[in-house]
């Protein structure tokens, strides 16, 4: 029996046992789940690092040494973004003033890009443009969930403001996913010759066809009902085949696994019509056990790459100051629009899952052909995201106290 395959089950047993305990406490404290999963990886990594008598720890030193773990982590990322795509609906943007939403989102992206660009280009990366670009992309998204975790739904007086911030977070996340995916695709196809492009034509045609289907939901629903009458419950198997064919085509042409997951979530939503509602309800609760794996791997990565030198702490402080600077400048801009400036400022402070996943994906040289961020800076970035998320949770507690109504307006 393959030793890596055997060790995989020890790995799964360890992470689920530890995560079961850790996540129960982090949820009581209203800490974001991804932070709990990363802490699980940290604990598991420490145990593995000091358990050389129990097993060969080198198997777990990097993802490249155990292909099974690598594939599970990639599936976890795919499932995570599938769930986002499945739950996404354009109706989320039907409320509120759309012109203000676009204006506020554009201002947030502009301020974030300027502040992060100055911090990255001027200090962290010593005028190195490409590293600064990926640093900005990784920290562009916001995690409003950290602020809302203590009290949701929010009090009546805050609903309009928080609805706007949630809509902004969705727009920025979509923007980040598409920019990151385009850059990855560009670096994948840049070395290819025209002959290679022709070989991938079929995959592109398949993707185009799947994309076109999303614009005809009624036709999809009619065909879904026809298949259900013809094949009964086994129609779902045929749809799953189409669904996996779409994922294959996306991976074949070099699209980011984040974009493929998001897009396939949209597709799954339409393929699994109301006649397969039960299948929809069963799929994600089962698949959700996979999406904690990449975050556990990020935690283990922190253990093996930890190097708390004075320069490390300087980088972490400057990164946190950059994120705090965005919140401060944005709140000042919102005050000019006579909005609840402090809430907007606090809302754009925390970073979340998207940031740490981008940072972790940048560890893989195949994303750009080379490492674009130093490993130490990726560690710094992940810690900065966790800290801002924890700060957001604490601020959420303060924000929703009885005295908050008079202090944050």
Image (spheres, rainbow, N blue to C red):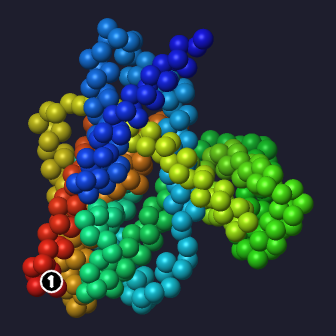
Classify the position of the N terminus by image quarter.
Answer: top right
Q: Is mark 1 on a helix, strand or loop?
A: helix
Kindly tell me whether residue 263 is visible in this rendering. no
* x then y, percent, for residue 158: 27, 83
The residue where tag 1 is placed is 405
Foreground residue among 200 and 298: 298
Tell me: 19 left or right of 118.
Answer: right
* x then y, percent, for residue 245: 75, 48
Where residue 223 sits, quadrant-wise, is: bottom right
Foreground residue among 161 and 154: 154
Farthest residue in the right direction? 230
Q: In this view, does 4 lie above or below 187?
A: above
* x then y, percent, for residue 335: 20, 86
* x then y, percent, for residue 232: 83, 57
Foreground residue among 273 and 368: 273
The residue at 56%/53% (across/down) is 284
The residue at 32%/21% (across/down) is 48
Classify the position of the C terminus by image quarter.
Answer: bottom left
The residue at 39%/28% (across/down) is 14
The residue at 41%/35% (across/down) is 16
Q: How many labels does the image show?
A: 1
Q: Is residue 200 above or below residue 370?
A: below
Where residue 281 sits, quadrant-wise, is: bottom right
Mark 1 nearby-residue class (10 Å; few <14, some 14–19, many ≥20)? few
Kindly tell me whether residue 313 is visible in this rendering. yes
Farthest residue in the top direction? 53
């Amino acid at each position: 029996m393959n030793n890596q395959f055997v060790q995989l089950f020890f790995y799964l047993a360890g992470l689920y046992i530890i995560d079961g305990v850790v996540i129960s406490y982090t949820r009581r404290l209203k800490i974001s789940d991804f932070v709990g999963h990363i802490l699980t990886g940290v604990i598991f990594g420490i145990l593995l690092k000091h358990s050389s008598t129990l097993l060969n720890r080198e198997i777990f030193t990097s993802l490249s040494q155990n292909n099974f773990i690598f594939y599970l982590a990639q599936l976890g990322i795919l499932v995570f973004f599938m769930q986002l795509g499945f739950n996404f609906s354009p109706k989320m943007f039907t409320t509120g003033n759309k012109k203000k939403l676009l204006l506020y989102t554009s201002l947030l992206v502009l301020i974030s890009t300027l502040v992060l660009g100055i911090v990255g280009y001027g200090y962290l990366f010593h005028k190195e443009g490409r590293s600064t670009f990926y640093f900005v992309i990784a920290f562009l998204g916001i995690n409003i969930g950290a602020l809302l975790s203590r009290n949701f739904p929010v009090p009546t007086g805050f609903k309009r403001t928080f609805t706007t911030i949630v809509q902004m977070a969705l727009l920025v996340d979509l923007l980040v996913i598409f920019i990151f995916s385009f850059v990855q695709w560009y670096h994948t196809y840049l070395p290819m010759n025209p002959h290679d492009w022709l070989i991938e034509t079929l995959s592109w045609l398949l993707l185009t066809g799947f994309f076109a289907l999303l614009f005809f939901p009624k036709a999809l629903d009619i065909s879904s009902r026809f298949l259900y009458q013809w094949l009964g419950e086994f129609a779902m198997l045929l749809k799953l085949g189409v669904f996996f064919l779409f994922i294959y085509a996306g991976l074949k042409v070099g699209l980011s696994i984040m974009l493929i997951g998001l897009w396939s979530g949209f597709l799954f939503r339409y393929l699994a019509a109301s006649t397969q509602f039960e299948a929809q309800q069963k799929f994600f609760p089962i698949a959700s056990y996979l999406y904690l794996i990449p975050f556990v791997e990020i935690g283990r990565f922190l253990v093996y790459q930890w190097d708390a030198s004075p320069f490390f702490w300087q980088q972490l402080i400057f990164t946190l100051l950059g994120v705090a600077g965005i919140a401060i400048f944005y709140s000042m801009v919102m005050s000019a629009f006579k909005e609840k400036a402090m809430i907007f400022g606090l809302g754009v402070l925390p970073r979340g899952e998207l940031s740490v996943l981008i940072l972790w994906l940048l560890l893989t040289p195949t994303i750009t052909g080379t490492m674009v961020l130093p490993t130490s800076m990726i560690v710094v970035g992940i810690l900065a995201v966790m800290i801002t998320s924890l700060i957001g949770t604490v601020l959420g507690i303060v924000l929703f106290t009885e005295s908050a109504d008079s202090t944050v307006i």
